[in-house]
Image (cartoon, helix red, strand yellow):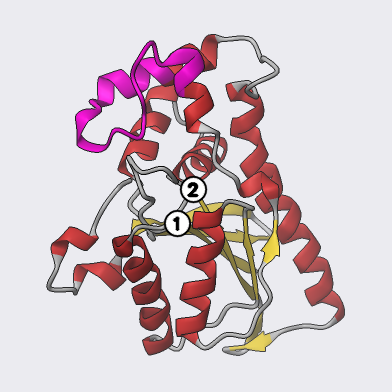
Amino acid sequence: MTHVFLVRHGQASSGTDNYDRLSPAGIEQARLLGRFWKQCDFRIDAAFSGSLERQQHTAQLALDELGSSLKVGTLEGLNEYDHSTIDRLYGKGIVSDGGDDLKFDQYVEIMSRWRDASATEAALSWKDFSGTGWATVTNAVDSHTQQIEKQPVRSHGGTHAHLAFFTSGGVIATILQQLLSTSFESTMHALWQTRNSSVTNLLFNKDGVSLVDYNTVAHLQGQPDKRLITQI
């Protein structure tokens, strides 16, 4: 069996000249995740991230704190949609990295216009984006499973693997949409609620794929500063 851990990046630098950079809170969130994993004697057999700075930096910080020397593979299918392009094409003057200024209904309107639009040279269609993350993860699981069958990883009396994918809220929400066949509105709620540095756990085995945990932040909930629990 294969445990897949989908990790959302730490808090991005919303409203600055580089949204893709982790904020100070985002850096701390990623470090706390790695420390929590180390305390739990957590094992990762392979790690992947998208090519975005906030995803790669989150992976680096968490794995450093875990004490892992794994090389993080880059899978562009883990990248988030380009929110600045989506805002320009479909936002009608509203920007989706506006933090507390953006209301959920406004966000759904932006995403609905993108969903209903034809693909342009500037943006993939919603349909293309929503299937990419699922295909990326399942292909990586299949590839790693084949390697395990050749050289089994023995742990806790069984043959299984722990794979970590450092990605973004949109990718995680649409992976859940593919897995659970949720509605578009439910997918938007999941995207909106996915917390920074949260962990979503999927189990792949001979019977299929199941959701074990969603959007957990145990590494942050025990911290005295509750402002570390963010969704940007």
Q: Nearer the viewer, residue 100 or 195?
A: 100
Q: Point out residue 130 in the picture as x, y percentages from the top left corner.
A: 59, 32
First in sequence: mark 1 vs mark 2: 1
Range covered by the magenta-colored residues: 87-110
State the residue at coordinates (48%, 65%): 58
Q: Quadrant of the N terminus?
A: bottom right
Q: Point out residue 57 in the picture as x, y percentages from the top left corner.
A: 51, 64
> How many C-alpha atoms fall within 10 Å of the one at disc 1: few (<14), some, or many (≥20)?
many
State the residue at coordinates (52%, 17%): 115
Residue 108 lies in the magenta-colored region: yes
Q: Point out residue 216 in the picture as x, y percentages from the top left corner.
A: 33, 60
Horizontal side, residue 37 vs residue 57: left or right: left
Asked if labels 2 and 1 touch by Cβ distance under 8 angstroms, the answer is yes
Q: Is residue 42 visible?
A: no
Horizontal side, residue 84 vs residue 138: left or right: left
> How many C-alpha atoms fall within 10 Å of the one at disc 2: few (<14), some, or many (≥20)?
many
Q: Quadrant of the C terminus?
A: top left
Residue bearing mark 2: 168
Residue 96 lies in the magenta-colored region: yes
Q: Is residue 125 above or below residue 139?
A: above
